[in-house]
Amino acid sequence: KNQVEQSPQSLIILEGKNCTLQCNYTVSPFSNLRWYKQDTGRGPVSLTIMTFSENTKSNGRYTATLDADTKQSSLHITASQLSDSASYICVVPDNTDKLIFGTGTRLQVFP
Amino acid sequence: DTGVSQDPRHKITKRGQNVTFRCDPISEHNRLYWYRQTLGQGPEFLTYFQNEAQLEKSRLLSDRFSAERPKGSFSTLEIQRTEQGDSAMYLCASSSSGGRAGYGYTFGSGTRLTVV
């Protein structure tokens, strides 16, 4: 069964600190993996998309890693800001282009 | 055309009433998806269209739900005889086929439905 699992479920950090979110997937065949940021009451916004040949990709303070052998990905946020408070969702499309979503990590950044 | 538009943003309805949501995809996208997201959960797939053809429907889509995309452009999602369990955010997304899976996938801001 195609699944995407994320950890932790929620995370609280202080402004300026770094954090790392984890994603494990069993979707096959694998094409790419996306990290989305979703603010409360809004639709998901893409942060980064990685194919199986990419190990690391950065988007500003966000850095995603991918290990296609172990089917794991991480999203590292550097020097967190209050505006980083949101849910971060790991997503992998199946072979019909339908997205399989993880349940997300809810990040709260406090001053 | 700057993205995927959904209307309305919020809808409050009484149990048993019918509601209809609209989604306008990015104009050059031929695929359109509907997802449902409940509080604290990731979005769950409901159905998708390629042009005007509805190619797949999730088992989550009961007989009370119907989606259309009559001209291959905008889409509507109707829920008949709403129940409190239908309360959720309904997300629409669009993409173009032919590219790598998941690329160009863009979400709308969603329609939040509250059934009272």
Image: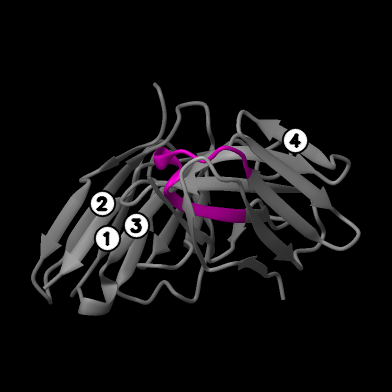
Residue A58 drawn at (x, y percent): 70, 33
How packed is label 1: few (under 14 Cα within 10 Å), some, or many (20 or more)?
some
Q: In the image, which is nearer the foreground, mark 4 or mark 1?
A: 4
Which residues are drawn in magenta?
A: A77-90
Give the numbered dot on residue B21: 2
Q: Please tell me whether residue A88 belongs to the stretch shown in magenta.
A: yes
| Residue type, label 3 | Tyr
Q: Nearer the viewer, residue A18 or A70?
A: A18
Q: Secondary structure at mark 2?
A: strand
Nearest the camera: A105 or B67? A105
For the residues marked 2 and 3, what is the alpha-carbon distance in whole angstroms?
Answer: 9 Å
Residue drawn at 66 percent across, 46 percent down: A76
Write down the residue under mark 4: A57
Q: Amino acid at mark 4?
A: Lys
Distance in Å between CA atoms under marks 1 and 3: 11 Å
Query: Mark 2 belongs to which subunit?
Result: B
Cα distance between the residues tagged 4 and 1: 40 Å
